Image: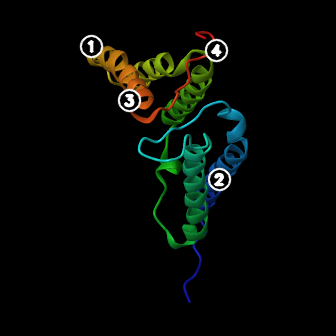
Amino acid sequence: MRRLNWDHDRFLEVWAALAIGLIASIGFVAVPNLVAGWAFVIPGTTDAAMAPTFFPRVALGMTIATSFLVIVTASMRSETLPLSAMSGPRWRRLAQLLLIIAAYFLGLRWIGFILSSAALLIVVPILVGYRKLVPLLLTAAILPPVIWLLFWYGLRVVLPTGRLLD
């Protein structure tokens, strides 16, 4: 019989998976309040609109399932986690990225998809060390409106416009 391997890295891995699974579970329950009023219309189907909770719940359900699998299989792994080998500056960068992502989600609600996404496409690459401003600005100016148009005209999905711009 194989001995269970429960070193520091496995505890860290399990606690991270538990935290992510818990956050995803809360999101799974809260999704109806976050997407109220939106509708997904899938071209070529007979349904007039798909429930707006469908896609977020699929993603959150997959996150919950993956967290569960990580927890169940943690004792089978023995390699060092990259997370446990991180230094102080890398932890700060990770915290900054998480704060930027949180700000992005808040921005979706207040200033909408296009402006929030453009800001994210500029700030994240700069934070991780990319310094070519022209490609960043071009990407930020072109990609969010193109995605918005594809969702609106291709899928009939209304992406957030923001409360300040309504």
User: Up-down: is 15 above or below 88?
Assistant: below
For badge 1, the amino acid type reads: Val
Q: In the rendered structure, find residue 163 and report the number of the disc placed on it.
A: 4
> How many angstroms separate mark 2 from mark 4 (CA)?
30 Å
Q: Residue furthest front?
A: 46
Give the SS element for disc 3: helix
Query: Which one is earlier in the sequence, the residue at label 1 or at label 3?
Result: 1
Give the SS element for disc 4: loop
For badge 3, the amino acid type reads: Leu
Q: Nearer the viewer, residue 128 or 137?
A: 137
For badge 4, the amino acid type reads: Arg
Q: Find disc 2 in the rendering and name its residue.
A: 21
Q: Residue at x 39, y 33 (%)?
A: 154
> How many angstroms separate mark 4 from mark 1 (CA)?
30 Å
Other residues around mark 2 within 10 Å, as few (<14) / some (14–19) / many (≥20)? many
User: Up-down: is 130 above or below 73?
Assistant: above
Q: Find disc 3 in the rendering and name its residue.
A: 150
Q: Position of residue 124 (x, y in %)?
A: 43, 25
Give the SS element for disc 2: helix
Q: Find disc 1 in the rendering and name its residue.
A: 134
Instruction: Tell me the mark number nearer the camera, choosing from 4 and 1.
Output: 4
Query: Which one is earlier in the sequence, the residue at label 2 or at label 4?
Result: 2
Question: Where does the C terminus fall, quadrant-wise?
Answer: top right
> How many angstroms separate mark 1 from mark 3 (CA)?
24 Å
User: Up-down: is 29 above or below 136?
Assistant: below
Q: Position of residue 79 (x, y in %)?
A: 45, 63
Q: Is residue 163 visible?
A: yes
Query: Which one is earlier in the sequence, the residue at label 2 or at label 1?
Result: 2
Other residues around mark 1 within 10 Å, as few (<14) / some (14–19) / many (≥20)? few
Instruction: Tell me the mark number nearer the camera, choosing from 3 and 2.
Output: 3
Instruction: Tell me the mark number nearer the camera, choosing from 4 and 3.
Output: 3
